[in-house]
Image (cartoon, grey):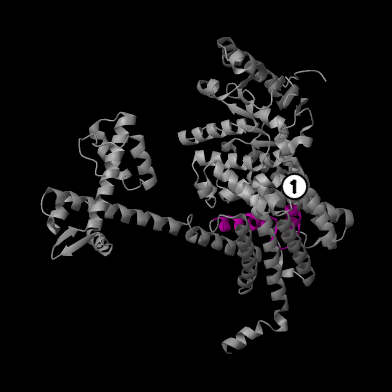
Amino acid sequence: MSFWQNISTYFSSEYYTFWVVSIGAGIICFAAGIVGTFSYLRKRALIGDVVSHAVLPGVAISFMLTGVKNPLYFLIGATTSGILSIWLVDFIQSKSKLKPDTILALTLSVFFGIGIVLLTKIQHSGDAAQSGLDSFLFGKAASMTMHDVIIFSIIALINTICIVVFLRAFSIISFDEEYAKSIGFNVKVIKSFLALLTVITVAIGIQSVGIVLMAALLITPASGARFLTNSVKKMLVYAGIFALFSGFSGVIISSSGKAMPTGPWIVVVLSIFTIIAIFFGKEKGVIARMRTRKSNNIKINNENTLKTIYKLSKEGNESISRDQLINNQSTTQFKPTLKRLEKNQILIRVNESVILTEKGKLAAREVIRKHRLWEIYLSKYFNLDPDHLHDDAEGIEHIITPEIEKHLITLLNRPEKDPHQSEIPY
Amino acid sequence: MEIPIIEAHNLTVLYGRKPAIWNVDFKLPEGQVIGIMGPNGSGKSTLLKAIMGVVKPTTGYTKLYDQELEKVRHKVSYVPQRQEIDWDFPASVWDVVSMGRFRVRGIFKRLTSEDNDIIKESLGKVNMLGFAKRQISQLSGGQQQRVFLARALAQQGELFLMDEPFAGVDVATEELIIDLLKDMKSNGKTLIIVHHDLHTAQSYFDHLVLMNTRLVACGKTSDVFTDQILTDTYGGKLTTIAKISQELENKEFPIRHR
């Protein structure tokens, strides 16, 4: 079978369920990912966990009351007990001295405990209609129908529209709730509305990914997205895309082998995304920070070498031999540093010797100036002895910006000599 | 005094059983720089929050311009304490200052070019125009404070309530804020500032509210900045009031029967 034939079988009718499930999972993950971004921004990551566990008693009670497994009744029951749990958390917080994490853990376990008790009771009731209720625990994505996908799409659409419309309100209460109150925004209503969206999303989502993993769908996309951007809008977009893709590919991976659970695979893919974001994020990412560190090291090596050459050339010969240089400085990566300086027209190499260019001399004087200014600053403002100044200045000279240098010069009244009586080269 | 710009009557705010502010009464004049001072935990911030409706008074009320807060809210700007905010939030300086226009535009309406001009002008007044696109997580303490001031300026109010604007800022920012305050005062604005540094109180403020959970004194700085009143505010009374408050909290005792 050729590759294209192989691909085309995926679009045949026998793969209908496969597509329904993967698209459905993608959509519900998307819905959770964007609304969960605000749970993340409001530092209420654990609230998602509480709510998803707290919906269980609601589900059980709605079955006990109606005796049928109707997704709508489940939704009503789940939403009610989810909201109840949030209200309880807020209530305990306002009335007791318990710490927030204690309250969250307490509420979560009480609700989940009651849910499990009720569920066990139902399972032992001998009612045949109850079979499959336990799938709420770990989710049962494979049984997703087109009907579910439509419901997922509706909640995804509602979340998207509400977030677009209320972006300003949701952002401001996440950043500075008290200021929002002070300009007359009805913070209570905005918060309740956001909570309602979250609870409904959770209540719908647990039917396919399960209670245990639902919280991950809310928080993981946002925490990955945070590494990639510094804007709430872009965070929402990234979180949405992460979640959509993870839901989709989680199903594909889990259907590729036997006994591969869907929910956990979705979470695994999401986590991989987050880890990638942690590595490759600009500014905050691990790689970006490694790059910054490397460029810092290069700067330090460059400037130290420059200083050594300048000082040696002032002591005598204009051109400095390699051996002289090596004897006088401790810089590692000697060769690449010289090469870089040559490339930047800081120095010229003649045979085995180096000579500073005019540009190089200026640059060297700048570093020395910063070094000595810092020494004066330290000795003047912190009363340090002259022999304690050098090491400190040796590090700081590389990070003094022109702005700070200017500030230092004015602060110190443009000094002529440093504490060691060396001249300051302006 | 003509119509006081702020009047507090019997104002009490309880956190649980513990009074943060307790039966506070005062009237404040318009067009002045007014300091609210007292030791740590004496309810200064809570007082501002109660005036702004951020916390609900347990009893009593405040009036601004002799009216309910809701009717004059457009005239009042609040500058919260810088340290209470997570500055790692994904937003730029511009984003934060533009919040100052949300009162006028509401939750839904887009900001206009007029709003943008006002935001620019406000940023200019605190010397932060060059930082408009900067991420707020990269700002120094002083710069953060300037951003908060710019946000309040963008509201174009008449009355400014500032919570510790001088706390943890650099000298340059402190000087800038002082100049800004003078400028605002000469334009007829009223400034109410929570402050904790006694050394600068006399030079900064025309009027003082000295409190320690209860109101100790309120009046012209020259009248109330006396050794006796300062001792009352910062000295012996602290322990008595603190002890009583602690008892109230521990024993869950009501401060009055209702």
Tell me if residue A43 comes above or below residue A294 in the rendering: above
Label 1 crowd (10 A; few <14 / some 14-19 / many >=20) = some
* Residue farthest toward the front in the current orientation of the protein: B186
* Residue farthest toward the right in the current orientation of the protein: A66
Coordinates of residue A178 in the picture (x, y in percent)? 67, 39
Mark 1 belongs to which amino acid? Ile
Q: Nearer the viewer, residue B102 or B205?
A: B205
Coordinates of residue B40 in the picture (x, y in percent)? 58, 24
Left or right of A312 in this view: A53: right
Q: Which residues are magenta?
A: A197-226
Q: Chain of mark 1?
A: A
Magenta segment includes A49: no
Q: Nearer the viewer, residue A323 or B28?
A: B28
Q: Main secondary structure of the magenta part?
A: helix
* Residue farthest toward the bottom in the current orientation of the protein: A1
Can residue A130 be seen here? The reply is: yes
Q: Nearer the viewer, residue A384 or B244?
A: A384
Residue under pointer 1? A190
Name which residue lies at 75% across and 27% down.
B62
Q: What kind of element bears circle 1?
A: helix
Tell me if residue A55 comes above or below residue B228 in the rendering: below
The quarter in which the C terminus of chain B is drawn is top right
Left or right of A333 in this view: B84: right
